Amino acid sequence: MQKPAPSDYPVHELIRERWSPRAFAEKPVPKNVLRSLFEAARWAPSSYNEQPWAYLIAAKDDKDGFEKMLGVLVEFNAGWAKSAPVLAIAVAKLAFATNNAPNRNAQYDTGAATAFLCLEATAHGLAVHQMAGFDPEKARQVCGIPAGWDAIAALAIGYPGDPASLPQPLKDREMAPRTRKPIAEFVMAGHWGHTASFASK
Ligand SMILES: Cc1cc2nc3c(=O)[nH]c(=O)nc-3n(C[C@H](O)[C@H](O)[C@H](O)COP(=O)(O)O)c2cc1C
């Protein structure tokens, strides 16, 4: 299923086509495609080019690894994410490697890298559903995440599937229209609350 963004203004088709399904097809993700997803993350910009991100990944053919990662998700997410062929956890290094000073953009940069990954995934006909609903401390224990690194988000990666495979409340959410705030609500002309003139229709 596709669910293009009904954008108010023209956007690149990768932006329009990316979305977060909960139904995934059984098809595995080829290794060369996985390489491209993480290569895309690699080329994201970051503060001081620190590249503070890391990803833990478990594909379904690694039964134990997959179950382990699934067990880190909250019950609601595990319920649908189990159908994804690949799970991942995005992790951020909280201090700069050179001087150990706190990197206040570590999570921001990790999010940017993951956004690149999501768009690359879209270009391959894949979908990525990011999740805050997981237990970061459990992820630390189960996956051996070292001190100084924080798990930021879990990801379900795969080819979009048939919404009919989902239980009823999720089926409805899968089919619901996509909504966003208008740009006039969050683009301000230099002073808080002053909507930029170009942003108003
Ligand atoms: C950081 C982050 C955390 C999210 N956490 C969850 C989650 O725990 N469970 C879930 O079902 N969706 C989660 N989502 C998906 C959002 O609900 C989804 O991106 C949003 O509704 C917009 O839909 P779209 O991605 O299809 O445009 C998360 C998305 C992001 C970026």
Image: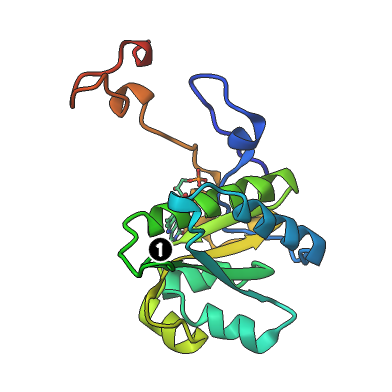
Q: Is residue 27 above or below residue 161?
A: below
Q: Amino acid at mark 1?
A: Ala
On the image, the x and y values in percent for residue 82 come to: 60, 73
On the image, the x and y values in percent for residue 81 come to: 56, 68
Left or right: 43, with 189 as reference point? right
In the displayed image of the protein, which residue is found farthest to the front?
99
The scheme the figure's colours follow is: rainbow
* Location of residue 75 (image quadrant): bottom left
Residue sitting at 29 percent across and 26 percent down? 185
Residue sitting at 59 percent across and 48 percent down? 116
> Quarter holding the N terminus?
top right
Depth check: give the residue in front, 133 or 33: 33
- Is the CB of the residue bearing disc 1 within 8 angstroms of ligand 1? yes
Residue sitting at 62 percent across and 81 percent down? 66
On the image, the x and y values in percent for residue 189 come to: 26, 19
Left or right: 50, with 185 as reference point? right
Q: Circle 1 is placed at which residue position?
A: 132
Depth check: give the residue in front, 192 or 176: 192
Left or right: 135, with 190 as reference point? right
Q: Is residue 65 above or below residue 16?
A: below
**Disc 1 secondary structure class:** loop
